[in-house]
Image (cartoon, grey):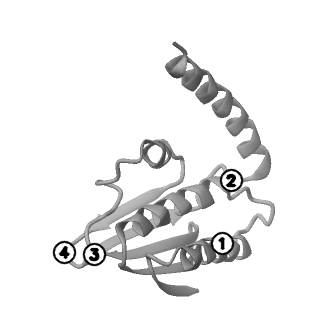
Amino acid sequence: MNWSIDSADAFSVARVRRSAIDAVRGLSEDPGADLFALELVLGELLAAETERGHWALAVSVESELAGPTIHVYAQGPPAIGVDHNEYRRAILLGTRVPLTVEASAQGTHIALRVPPEASGEAMFRSRATETYQRAQEISRRYTY
């Protein structure tokens, strides 16, 4: 499945994000797989591209031996390195989603893969512990 959009069109970006996740769910071996982390990371990557303005974006979903993969192709340098949004940087730097970024003079290629712990039960256990730890860290950081 392939989509080509203008990164400044927020509605199209949101529609492609949802469609790409639905396509990954259809290709996934585990129909109950929790793709929340994958959708969150994809959404933040696309949001970074949206903030850059009118650039061509191509998104594709492919089935590979290791599982479904989402490819994002963007014009220009990667938006991740110049992004000043702390929330987005925390998500992208702290994610367990396998993420590859390749940049060249022609543009940027980002590949996202389904996390190995995406099965429902494993994801619930790790997320519950991780969420509690992050909540504790955030509350310590913002407590005066």
Of all residues shown, which one is farthest toward the left?
A: 105
Residue 69 versus residue 38: which sits nearer the camera?
Answer: 38
* Mark 3 neighbour density, 10 Å: few (under 14) some (14–19) many (20 or more): some
Disc nearer the start of the sequence (2/1):
1
Q: Which mark is residue 105?
A: 4
Q: Which mark is residue 107?
A: 3
Task: Work out how far the residue at label 4 is from the one at label 3, CA to CA, in angstroms.
Answer: 6 Å
* Mark 4 neighbour density, 10 Å: few (under 14) some (14–19) many (20 or more): few
Amino acid under label 2?
Ala
Residue position for label 2 = 118
Amino acid under label 1?
Arg
Residue 68 versus residue 55: which sits nearer the camera?
Answer: 55
- Please say if 33 is above or below 59: above
Residue 118 position within the rendered picture, expressed as x and y whole percent measured from the top left: 68, 53
Q: Which mark is residue 1?
A: none
Disc nearer the start of the sequence (2/4):
4
**Residue mark closest to the camera, 1 vs 4:** 1
Task: Work out how far the residue at label 1 is from the one at label 4, CA to CA, in angstroms.
Answer: 29 Å
Secondary element under disc 2, as helix, strand or loop, is loop
Secondary element under disc 1, as helix, strand or loop, is helix
Secondary element under disc 3, as helix, strand or loop, is strand
Amino acid under label 4?
Ala
Residue 105 placement: quadrant? bottom left
**Residue mark closest to the camera, 2 vs 4:** 4
